[in-house]
Amino acid sequence: MQNVSTHPYAALMPDVVLDAVDARGYLTDGRLLALNSYENRVYQVGIEDSVPLIVKFYRPGRWSTAQILEEHRFALELEEHEITVVAPLSIEGETLFEHAGFRYAIYPRRGGHAPEPGRLDQLEWLGRFIGRMHAVGSAQRFEHRVRLSPQLMGRNSVALLEQGDWLPDYLRGNFLDVAGQLLDIVETRFGSDNWTTLRLHGDCHPGNILWTDAGPHFVDLDDCLTGPAIQDIWMLLAGPRHERELQLRTFLEGYEQFRLFDPVELLLIEPLRTLRMIHYMGWLAQRWDDPAFPAAFTWFGTPRYWEDQLNDLREQVEALAAPVLRLQP
């Protein structure tokens, strides 16, 4: 584990955060609130005689400058089409800045709450919203952002866990066998068709959606990527199978007002769920040198944790064998 004092974020002290915002022409008032973010560091910063701003400091070494700027351009393009996302502020024509060795962007503060699980009226609204977003996303292509794949989200994560001292000896073999079996199935499923891909939000779960009386708006395009449309849909479905089928039909009633959905993509829901599960384990292991992670995820790496993960992966073998969701009642 990397020592706290040597981790790059150890240098991101309060005065560095405030100075970075001041350097962009604002007058900070000393108020600083760390927001819930682990991959990057995000703060609400008070501004003299004005509303606070949000500043995001990108994790060093994760994205290239070209990839970050492509994220910003996508957010601004969506905003230009009156799709309510929280896009970075453009200051003298620039959206990405550097201070004390950190790259950062400044955003307006936006309020709201996560959508309520299973609310059909909200799901239809989200369908229209994401349909509009995907219509814009399909108009151009990313040049620098990553492409969703079993290798990126699955094989790489398993390799990291296998090479590190993460898996208990007594279940190491079983874990790797089940993970390998799952990824074989996932790769076969991904290779079974020529999926239409487009620019996506990429991490479209309810926590990245803020709901107000005026409707939804999206935050955090940090994981935007190229992939099939279903990646921005499946995480909004919850509950027993019959409920998820109703939710999906309701969502698509809104979505298809702006973009047709290819039902063959339903074959990817459980593969994508599998990849997200495996990727999450690898992400925690990869970030364990960041002192914020052992403090927040105290259960990670315990024998009980890996036993639970192995059981969950075994259940995914059954889920992958089950029929896909139906669009017709």
Image (cartoon, grey):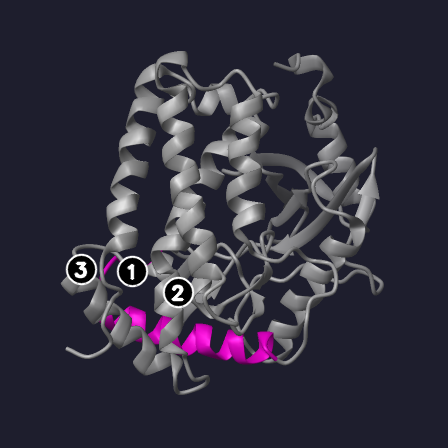
Q: Please tell me which residue is depicted at 54% across the width and 41% down the height of the picture.
A: 155
Q: Is residue 310 above or below residue 268?
A: above
Q: Is residue 229 above or below residue 167?
A: below
Residue 207 seen anywhere in this rendered image of the structure: no
Indicate the position of residue 151 as horizontal and vertical percent values.
57, 47
Q: Splitting the image into 4 quarters, where does residue 59 fall?
A: top right
The front one of 296 and 210 is 296
Q: Splitting the image into 4 quarters, where does residue 8 fall?
A: top right
Q: Between marks 2 and 3, how big is the CA–CA gap?
A: 15 Å
Magenta region: 114-138
Q: Is residue 277 left or right of residue 89?
A: left
| Amino acid type of the residue tagged 2 in the rendering | Ile
| Amino acid type of the residue tagged 1 in the rendering | Leu
Residue 324 seen anywhere in this rendered image of the structure: yes
Q: Which residue is mark 3?
A: 241
* Numbered-mark total: 3
Residue 237's mark?
Answer: 1
| Amino acid type of the residue tagged 3 in the rendering | Arg
Q: Please tell me which residue is depicted at 70% across the width and 25% down the height of the picture.
A: 13
* Crowdedness near tag 1: few (<14), some (14–19) or many (≥20) residues, C-alpha within 10 Å: many
Q: Kindly report the secondary structure that dominates the magenta region of the rendered protein.
A: helix
Mark 2 in CB contact with mark 3 (< 8 angstroms) = no
Indicate the position of residue 99 as horizontal and vertical percent values.
83, 39
Residue 133's mark?
Answer: none
